[in-house]
Image: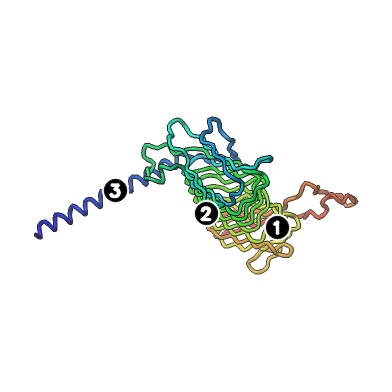
């Protein structure tokens, strides 16, 4: 009896070790595949590709979109003259499984493929990369937009969003002409570029930078990155308070800065900016509207010119 029990224990132990080995091998395979999938390209904006298939139409009554994507570019565009939401995907000849869409109330959920829901392929004998393109009416406003992408470059053009959540492993994220109230980003490595209006930012990253041209004065911007730059352009009349906790990195600004304890303050200090990480430079400069023109002529009386430009540039180097 004891011999049979020992044999069973040994067999179970071997089975567990084999399963663990297979699991680790699959995970390593997926990581290697993902490393080779996406090449980060500076200022890259994907264009809709040819050969798009599986077009689907949805009512503009949809107010929430949830996207789960493995790899491939994601583009979301707002366009004039539309009254439906269109979803396209572009697949290579090696990909046989189309995306999977479901609706529940005012929520549209888009997933990489139906096969991935039924049985996890773990990336074996499967071409990961497919491009997703979503076109929405220009007058349409999101309540919520969430994107969970393993390896994707994401571009969002001209959208108004109350709550935007993004989780990704790698790939760039770009917002152009967008109005976002709450923006929550969690990424391992993938820079973010933002151009539009923004109220609240929560940015967590291992190694990524945030480049923002913000046309309003935000309420709160929070960034936690081990190594990444924070580069902001804010309106000239925007007051801010910067609190920074990092071991190294420079600070520069063309705003007039006052030091108050550990904080750097401009104007009324209303926009709260908090930065933490091991290293990373911080640049906060003035964003000028199209109606503003820098003018250093003391005799100029043109009201459309900007006569309040700071004559000094504040720069600090912070090394501990």
| Residue 176 in the image: above or below residue 183 | above
Query: What's the mark number on residue 217?
Result: 1
Q: CA distance from mark 1 to mark 3?
A: 53 Å
Do callouts 2 and 3 mark residues in contact (Cβ within 8 Å)? no
**Camera-side residue of 57 and 37:** 57
- In-image side of 119 versus 265 (left or right): left
Residue 40: image x %, image y %?
53, 41
SS type, badge 3: helix
Which residue appears at 18% of the width and 56% of the height? 9
- Residues under labels 2 and 1: Cα distance? 23 Å
Between residues 44 and 309, which one lies in front from this camera angle? Answer: 44
Measured as percent of width and height from the top left, residue 15 is found at: 23, 50
At horizontal 75% and vertical 55% (from top left) the residue drawn is 236
For the residue pair 161 and 228, the one nearer the viewer reads as: 161
Where residue 204 appears, as percent x and y from the top left, is 53, 56
Neighbor class of circle 3 (other Cα within 10 Å; few <14, some 14-19, many 20+) is few
Q: Secondary structure at mark 2?
A: strand
First-in-chain label (2 vs 1): 2
Which mark is first along the chain, 3 or 1? 3
Residue identifier under label 2: 186
Marks 2 and 3, the one that precedes in the sequence: 3
The span from disc 2 to disc 3 (Cα, nearest Å) is 30 Å
249 or 15, nearer to the observer? 15
* Disc 3 target residue: 21
Please give the label number shown on residue 191.
none
Q: Split into 4 quadrants, where in the image is the N terminus?
A: bottom left
């Amino acid at each position: 009896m004891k011999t049979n029990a020992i044999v069973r224990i040994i067999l179970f132990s071997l089975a567990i070790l084999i399963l663990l080995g297979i699991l680790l091998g699959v995970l390593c395979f997926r990581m290697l595949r993902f490393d080779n999938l996406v090449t980060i390209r500076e200022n890259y904006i994907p264009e809709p590709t040819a050969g798009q298939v599986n077009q689907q139409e949805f009512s503009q009554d949809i107010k929430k979109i949830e996207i789960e994507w493995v790899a491939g570019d994601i583009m979301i565009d707002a366009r004039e003259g539309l009254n439906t939401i269109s979803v396209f995907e572009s697949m290579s000849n090696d990909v046989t499984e189309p995306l999977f869409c479901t609706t529940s109330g005012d929520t549209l959920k888009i997933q990489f493929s139906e096969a991935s829901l039924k049985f996890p392929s773990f990336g074996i004998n499967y071409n990961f990369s497919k491009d997703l393109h979503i076109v929405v009416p220009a007058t349409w406003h999101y309540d919520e937009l969430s994107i969970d992408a393993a390896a994707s470059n994401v571009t969002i053009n001209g959208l108004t969003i109350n709550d935007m959540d993004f989780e990704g492993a790698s790939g760039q994220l770009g917002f152009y002409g967008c109005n976002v109230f709450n923006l929550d980003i969690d990424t391992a490595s993938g820079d973010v570029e933002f151009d539009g209006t923004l109220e609240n930012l929560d940015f967590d990253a291992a190694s990524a930078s945030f480049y923002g041209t913000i046309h309003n004065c935000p309420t709160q911007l929070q960034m936690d990155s081990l190594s990444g730059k924070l580069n902001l352009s804010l309106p000239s009349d925007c007051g801010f308070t910067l609190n920074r906790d990092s071991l190294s990195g420079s600070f520069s600004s063309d705003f007039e800065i006052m030091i108050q304890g550990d904080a750097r303050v401009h104007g009324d200090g209303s926009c709260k900016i908090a930065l933490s990480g091991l290293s990373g430079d911080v640049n906060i400069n003035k964003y000028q509207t199209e109606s503003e023109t820098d003018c250093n002529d003391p005799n100029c009386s043109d009201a459309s010119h900007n006569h309040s430009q700071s004559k000094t540039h504040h720069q600090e180097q912070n090394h501990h």
